[in-house]
Amino acid sequence: MEHKPSLVGGACIIAGVCVGAGMLGLPSAGAGAWTLWSMFAVTLTMVVMTVSGWMLLESYKGYPLRVSFDTVTRDLLGKRVNALNNLSVYFVGGILLYAYITSSGLIIQEMLGLESHWGSVLFTLFFSVVVWHSTRAVDRISVLLVILMGLSFAFGISGMSMNVRLDLLLDRIGSETHYAPYALGMLPVALTSFGYHHSVSSMRAYYGEERRASRAILGGTAIALTFYLIWLASVFGNLPRSEFGPVIEQGGNVDALLKALGSVIESKAVASALNAFSMAAILSSFIGVGLGVFDYLADLFQFDNSRGGRAKSWAVTFLPPLLLSLLFPFGFLVAIGYAGAVATLWTCIIPPLLAWKVRRMGNKEGFRAPGGLLMIVLVIAFGVLTAAFHLLNMVDLLPVYKG
């Protein structure tokens, strides 16, 4: 009897792709909206991103199991749309690498007393070698980092959750009465935290069919959502809303958030666990995203897999974001916001368009994402509005919380 892959395993793969350094930006992005509206924004994003993943899964029907996002988009929507889609995937990867390099440089600066640019250089040179070496090296390091993330997160959050204050969690000590408008600017950061769509084809190949893959996707996004809600409640229940002012002023950088949390957490062990979790999350995301961009550029420029070819791929993958980090250290939250705005193209716009095209072609057999034409329109509208909110935020046309 043939062994079927478990749904738990697939759900954990999707959750692992989602949960990473992006979640570190959620508290700062949600400081204006605070607890209830931040949780609503993250939950709404999870629902939309799950449905859009299902729409992408639906569009793979009739194709070989190993088909890629790139192939299906080019086949159904044409070369120009596919080129734009690929460009957006690369941009998001590059801007995330830039965010991780900037944040890690600041954390290393605090730890070792170096100038921040030296911290960024050391981090990039040291850890990008893992990606240059081999995918297998990334695999081994990722397993260790996931274990470290799990243990440090569990210890840190358990320590914080025991000290959650209801008056802080519900902001009863503040004078604010209008939280909802601030939630709009949080959506691009929330969207980045559910960016698993490049793994949809892998899930389909893993299970050999769409229905079980769709359940694994739902399980994975639900696990990620649970992590994010616990994280938000733990931070907002310990750190007063007014304390986010200095963090936001520094671009939402992770080191600033950790410093603010360290000032209100009495246990040094809990503060150290949060530091370890943050560093592991950034490093895990850095090598994971770095590997994706590395392989993408190696294919684009036709660099071979020799040491010299991999060195070229390494240079075009890591040197541009490192250079940008040294010249324009905008801040973690700003970079994550840009990534979320551009990621709307391949997470909320392309997948529903693909599903619409498949349905127009009359392919009604097999798996179908729920909701019909109305759901397609709603997912696209969510993507367009999320990108628009980021642009409006940039020009100060949305309410921005500054502490």
Image (spheres, rainbow, N blue to C red):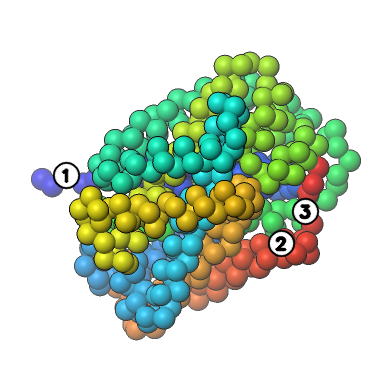
| Residue type beneath disc 2 | Met
Distance from the alpha carbon under mark 1 to that under mark 2: 51 Å
Left or right, 132 with respect to 166, comes to left
Q: CA distance from mark 1 to mark 3?
A: 52 Å
Mark 3: which amino acid?
Val
Q: Which residue is mark 1?
A: 3
User: Which residue does the numbered mark 3 point to in the structure image?
Assistant: 400
Q: Describe the element under mark 1 as helix, strand or loop.
A: loop
Image height of 205 relative to 24, above or below: below
Q: Residue at x 24, y 53 (%)?
A: 308
Asked which secondary structure carries label 3, the reply is loop
Circle 2 is placed at which residue position? Answer: 394
Q: Residue at x 68, y 66 (%)?
A: 391
- 9 relative position to 242: left or right: left
Task: Indicate the secondary structure of the residue bearing disc 2.
Answer: helix
**Which quarter of the figure has residue 199?**
bottom left
* Among numbered discs 1 and 2, the one appearing first in the sequence: 1
- Cα–Cα gap, marks 2 and 3: 10 Å
Of callouts 1 and 3, the N-terminal one: 1
Q: Tell me which residue sits at (39%, 75%) in the image.
A: 82
